Amino acid sequence: MSENTITFEIDGVEVQGIAGQTIMAAADAVGIYIPRLCAFEGLPPFGSCRICTVKVNGRFQSACTQPIAEGIMVENDTEELLELRRNLVDMLFVEGNHFCMFCEKSGNCELQALAYRFGIAAPKYPYMFPADRNVDATHKDIFIDHNRCVLCARCIRASHDLDGKNVFQFVGRGPQKRIAVNSTAKLVGTDIDVTDQAVAVCPVGAILKKRVGYTIPVGQRKYDHEPIGSDIEANKQ
Amino acid sequence: MTKEQNRIMAKPKVATTSLAGCFGCHMSILDIDERILQLIELIEFDKSPINDIKEFTGECLVGIVEGGCANEENVRVLQDFRKHCKILISLGDCAINGGLPAMRNTIPLKECLDEAYLNGPSVYNPSGQIPNDPEIPLLLDKVYPCHEVVKMDYHLPGCPPSADTIWQTLVALLTDAPLELPYELIKYD
């Protein structure tokens, strides 16, 4: 055991991680799934969606940003945190216009998969049906449907950090906050390419490639049979 | 206990309706195939498009509602269901979130009507009239999920929910057994 090893607890089970790891990364490594939406492997942590909220020594922290420390007691799979995460997913569903029944991303959507995993039959909050969300289909290979955007900023981070471009950015504050593109001529005026990571990392059906929708039949999609996080839990030691 | 109550206790009644839906969820009910014979052992259908009974004949144990509320008649039928049914189930995405009809919720109602009856590219309407007969139920300002109109007891998502989802739920309800739907039976599409 190297001196970099840190021992702590998740839900009463002793686990070990490497100094500098976040709680989420350490949990992933030992096969404990902490639900997440804005976090994406390969992108720096962002900590905005709060789905990965855990309790560390009794205080709420986002597992994707909080580093592990010797002896900390992390709560993850508890009724209280499940309720909190369920409420967050409920709010995301009512805040946008999420029509799963015709969405191309259905079955491969991480927001939907979280709702499945949490057993949500219907959101508890009233639907807002916002009217100010538009669709930008100006690009020949890609379109953005702002109705489905959950403001996770994965596209912003991936474009900047992985693609070496700067296609997306947040504009506005509070309820007006939205993703904008770095061009007055909409998406077609940017240097985005269909092979960019910024396109691939969208967890929902907000940024989609054209002409490939519905190619995977129902029953063979990512979350048709196994809940989200099953791949991580398969590594359980 | 009156004779009437006794009869209800003997064989619970189930009512179904399609509000602003496409009848796809009702097709999914019929997709339980030969199990419908077992279902008939357990229940009796009251007001439902399946048997074409138009009005409630009494109190029902379960009311199954497909579709959300797009017009005033939908609201009246839904309130009638609430009054007559002990347990109300939202069946399918339209009942739960308005579904496809709710796509109009982001567009003002007048714009929707103008597009449908005046400005649409294939519209031929020389009189320029938008249908306004008292027989036609008035449209609501937007399409409402059922649980935003009356209290709904259970929600079965899906477009449509699979026959297995419907079957397992009904059997659990009617036999007083706990309902544990497997992961594959809760889907939003």
Image (cartoon, rainbow, N blue to C red):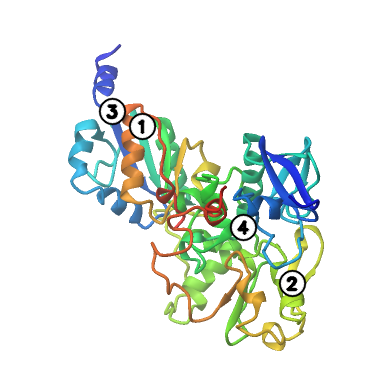
| Badge 4 density bin: few <14, some 14–19, many ≥20, Cα 10 Å | many
Q: Chain of mark 2?
A: A
Helix, strand or loop status at disc 4: loop
Q: Nearer the viewer, residue A104 or B69?
A: A104
Tell me whether circle 1 and circle 4 mark residues in contact (CB < 8 Å).
Answer: no
Q: CA distance from mark 3 to mark 4?
A: 38 Å
**In this view, A215 is above or below B175:** below
The picture places residue B106, in percent across and down from the top left corner, at 60, 63
Using the image, tell me which numbered label, if any, was put on residue B12: 3
Using the image, tell me which numbered label, if any, was put on residue A129: 4
Callout count: 4
Q: Is residue A200 left or right of residue A106?
A: right
Lower position in the chain sequence, tag 1 or tag 3: 3
Residue at point 71% right, 73% down?
A: A158
Q: Chain of mark 4?
A: A
Residue at the front extreme, as displayed = A1
Badge 1 amino acid: Leu
**In this view, A203 is above or below A197:** above
Q: CA distance from mark 2 to mark 1?
A: 48 Å
* Residues tagged by mark 1 and mark 3 found on one chain of the structure: yes
| Badge 3 density bin: few <14, some 14–19, many ≥20, Cα 10 Å | some
Helix, strand or loop status at disc 2: helix
Residue B141 shows in this picture: no
Q: CA distance from mark 1 to mark 3?
A: 11 Å
Residue at point 63% right, 59% down?
A: A96
Name the residue that disc number 2 marks: A156
**In this view, B175 is above or below A161:** above
Name the residue that disc number 1 marks: B173
